[in-house]
Image (cartoon, rainbow, N blue to C red):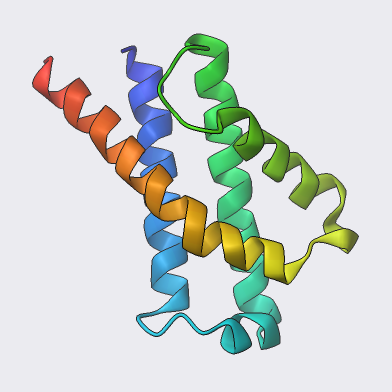
Amino acid sequence: MQHSIEMYLLDISNSIESINEYLGVEKKFENYESNKLLRRAVERELEIIGEAVNRILKVDPNINISNARRIVNLRNWVIHSYDNVDNIIIWGIINKDLPLLKKQISDLLDSRNSSD
């Protein structure tokens, strides 16, 4: 694994942690949906995650990140179709996809650290 990949993996990990911090322990959809600042912050972190995955794929297209292409596509959707972002879809991604991504990124970072 190259140094640049490790940096991008850390960016993804930090963005996931930030999203979890923004949402708090309770993680209520009503709070998310009613708070524009919170929604924009989460969307920004998803953009960062998507861009980092995109850069990783350019270095190593075979990296073990499930749905890597979908993650990049999400980034593009949030940026380019900002007026059509669906809060329910984003909420589903937060609750279903981010925990899996967090685990995969953690595993990749652990394997990087154990090979040093």
Q: Position of residue 11 (x, y in %)?
A: 42, 41
Say which residue appears at 55% left-offset and 54% top-offset. Answer: 45
Q: Quadrant of residue 75?
A: top right
Residue 85 higher or lower than 32, as above or below = above
Residue 62 higher or lower than 33, as above or below = above
Left or right, 50 with reference to 99: right
Residue 17 higher or lower than 29, as above or below = above
Q: Position of residue 51 (x, y in %)?
A: 60, 35
Q: Position of residue 83 (x, y in %)?
A: 89, 62
Left or right, 92 with reference to 77: left
Instruction: Quarter of the image for the N terminus: give it.
Output: top left
Q: Position of residue 32 (x, y in %)?
A: 60, 80
Q: Quadrant of residue 16?
A: bottom left
Left or right, 114 with reference to 80: left
Between 4 and 107, which is closer to the camera in this rendering? 107
Say which residue appears at 46% left-offset and 76% top-offset. Answer: 23
The number of discs equals 0
Residue 106 higher or lower than 95, as above or below = above
Left or right, 63 with reference to 68: left
Say which residue appears at 69% left-offset and 44% top-offset. Answer: 74
Between 20 and 11, which is closer to the camera in this rendering? 20
Say which residue appears at 45% left-offset and 29% top-offset. Answer: 65
Instruction: Quarter of the image for the C terminus: give it.
Output: top left
